Image (cartoon, rainbow, N blue to C red):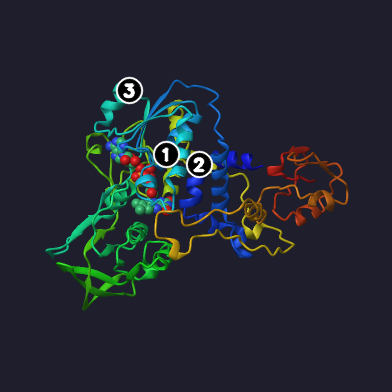
């Protein structure tokens, strides 16, 4: 039931093919299967479904109602696109205004094509647009309140990201080219080829630094290196990203800070990690030969347009603060994604967009927004590993995606390939279905009283409480803990996803 699976996914996230590629999938670390062998490869199933939807041209249905409310979304990155999608599903009229010539935000202009092919992203954005959402490109919003008023918008979702590359003051004489990583990735993403020289250093240890260095390497320079002040254990990048960069030939100089630059000579100080986990200087130096420097030291939120909006507040890092319902200090103006305080990932940005849309929906209807309205609604019956009754063991090793060999990674072709259909089916079958009945019929077989009746595929079971003696046979064998025992007498018939036995 691939299409049903995709539609289930789409209830939360309109970008499955994209997310199946770029999400850092922390969910897999929380998967109960890690206690047995390895978490289910959730992201690759997501990617498979997303790709199939693009291939099969699956679309979302038109909203059932039109509310007549108008919402302006500023920024067509993952957060703005997701908010727009959920607001449209609720029946609101949504317009997105985007400064860049292409939608997608950092997914388009930051994340390199070897991790996210642009045709995949474009297809998922086109599907969002096809729901009747208009995206005006090349339109930088300068005066938010004026645009809101002129367009007679009832509410605004602001998701302009954080695009100003942080700078650092390094004494330099005759230094070669210095540029920031986001501008560099943007230029190369647009097909430009900045002149960099033979030896290029990227300064920083985050994910952006890894992508910048891997991109530099693909541009055919003699030496792509990273200079970073901490060690591998203390870097902000995920370790698989450093592994991939190194496998592709990027040379990482750990525990180094740039002190000064004279021409191509970079004087770097060797650092060490103190007991507090922070890097500290050692007074020892070495010289690295570098022609161009790319700064990947993080990004700040652009404040220009925001300073004219009444009521906004910022934290000490310059991020725009929002309340638990994603509303800023300006009534009716919601915000999310990289510009608000939180981890900066496409996944969080999408989550903010979804949560904000739900809160905005309630606000637009004049209801008091329920605190954290978005987060809890999908959680039905959460069971962790200790709550499972796994009376069997399965040997089912995680399926791994194929990838180009490091030697083949010399252009912007996608590095990681998806799983095959057979692998996806196998991977899905590794799921323990924690807390969700998958109709294994174990309870039906275990009941000594014949109190349980099968209602047919997808319909679950019915319990006859007059016959049930409360012996727990069904409960104890239920591997996914979809059955709860309660000391209440009541006839119930529940769908497969939430079977609950109630006994005398
Ligand atoms: C190199 C790099 C690699 C990354 N890799 C990953 C990854 O693998 N996985 C992951 O989860 N995250 C990754 N991230 C982080 C992720 O891309 C961001 O967290 C995410 O894109 C933030 O989404 P957003 O919608 O808040 O902002 P953005 O994606 O930045 O989008 C904001 C949009 O607003 C537009 N805009 C700005 N100002 C205005 C204005 N005044 N008017 C109109 N439009 C405006 C911008 O042009 C942009 O399109 C990466 C980031 C970078 C830089």
Residue at figure coordinates x 39%, y 38% from the top left = 80
Marks 1/3: CA–CA distance: 24 Å
Residue at figure coordinates x 58%, y 57% from the top left = 31
**Who comes first in sequence, dot 3 or dot 2?**
2
Q: Which mark is residue 151?
A: 3
> Dot 2 corresponds to which residue?
13
Q: Secondary structure at mark 3?
A: loop
In the drawing, does residue 491 fall left or right of residue 155? right
Q: Nearer the viewer, mark 1 or mark 2?
A: 2
Residue 449: percent from left, percent from top? 88, 48
Q: Secondary structure at mark 1?
A: loop
Marks 3/2: CA–CA distance: 28 Å
> Dot 1 corresponds to which residue?
325
Residue at figure coordinates x 40%, y 54% from the top left = 412
Marks 1/2: CA–CA distance: 19 Å
- Taking depth in this image into account, of 466 and 110 the one nearest to the observer is 110
Label 1 neighbourhood size at 10 Å, few (<14), some (14-19), many (20+)? many
Where 2 sits versus 217, above or below?
above
Where 286 sits versus 295, above or below?
below
- If the image is split into quadrants, where does the N terminus sit? top right
């Amino acid at each position: 039931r691939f299409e049903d699976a995709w539609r289930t996914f789409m209830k939360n996230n309109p970008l499955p093919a994209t997310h199946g590629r770029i999400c850092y999938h922390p969910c897999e670390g929380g998967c109960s299967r890690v206690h047995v062998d390895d978490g289910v490869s959730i992201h690759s199933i997501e990617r498979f479904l997303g790709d199939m939807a693009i291939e099969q041209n699956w679309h979302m249905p038109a909203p059932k109602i039109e509310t007549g409310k108008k919402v302006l979304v500023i920024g067509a990155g993952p957060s703005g696109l997701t908010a727009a999608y959920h607001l449209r599903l609720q029946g609101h009229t949504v317009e997105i205004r985007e400064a860049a010539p292409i939608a997608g935000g950092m997914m388009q202009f930051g994340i390199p094509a070897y991790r996210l092919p642009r045709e995949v992203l474009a297809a998922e954005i086109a599907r969002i647009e096809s729901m009747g959402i208009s995206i005006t490109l090349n339109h930088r919003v300068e005066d938010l309140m004026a645009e809101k008023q002129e367009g007679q918008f009832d509410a605004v979702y602001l998701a302009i990201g954080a695009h100003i590359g942080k700078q650092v003051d390094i004494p330099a004489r005759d230094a070669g080219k210095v540029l920031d990583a986001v501008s560099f990735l943007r230029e190369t993403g647009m097909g430009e080829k900045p002149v960099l020289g033979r030896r290029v250093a990227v300064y920083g240890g985050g994910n952006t630094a890894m992508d910048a260095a891997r991109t530099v390497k693909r541009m055919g320079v003699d030496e792509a290196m990273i200079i970073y002040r901490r060690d591998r254990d203390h870097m902000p990048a995920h370790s698989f990203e450093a592994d991939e960069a190194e496998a592709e030939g990027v040379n990482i100089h750990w525990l180094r800070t740039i002190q000064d630059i004279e021409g191509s000579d970079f004087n770097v100080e060797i650092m060490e990690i103190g007991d507090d986990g922070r890097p500290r200087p050692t007074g020892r130096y070495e010289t690295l030969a570098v022609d161009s420097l790319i700064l990947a030291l993080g990004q700040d939120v652009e404040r220009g347009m925001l300073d004219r909006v009444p009521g906004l507040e910022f934290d000490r890092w310059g991020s725009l603060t929002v309340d638990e319902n994603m509303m800023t200090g300006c009534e009716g103006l919601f915000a999310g994604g990289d510009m608000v305080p939180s981890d900066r990932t496409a996944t969080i940005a999408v989550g903010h967009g979804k949560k904000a849309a739900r809160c905005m929906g309630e606000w637009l209807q004049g209801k008091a927004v329920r605190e954290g309205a978005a987060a809890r609604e999908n959680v039905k019956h959460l069971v962790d590993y200790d709550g499972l009754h796994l009376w069997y063991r399965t040997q089912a090793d995680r399926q791994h995606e194929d990838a180009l060999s490091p030697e083949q990674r010399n252009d912007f072709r996608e590095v990681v390939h998806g799983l095959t259909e057979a692998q996806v089916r196998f991977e899905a079958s590794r799921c323990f279905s924690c807390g969700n009945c998958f109709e294994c019929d174990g309870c039906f077989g275990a009941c000594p009283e014949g109190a349980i009746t099968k209602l047919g595929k997808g319909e679950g079971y019915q319990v006859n409480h007059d016959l049930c003696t409360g012996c727990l046979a069904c409960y104890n064998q239920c591997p996914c803990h979809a059955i709860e025992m309660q000391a209440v007498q009541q006839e119930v018939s529940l769908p497969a996803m939430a079977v609950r036995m109630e006994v005398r």
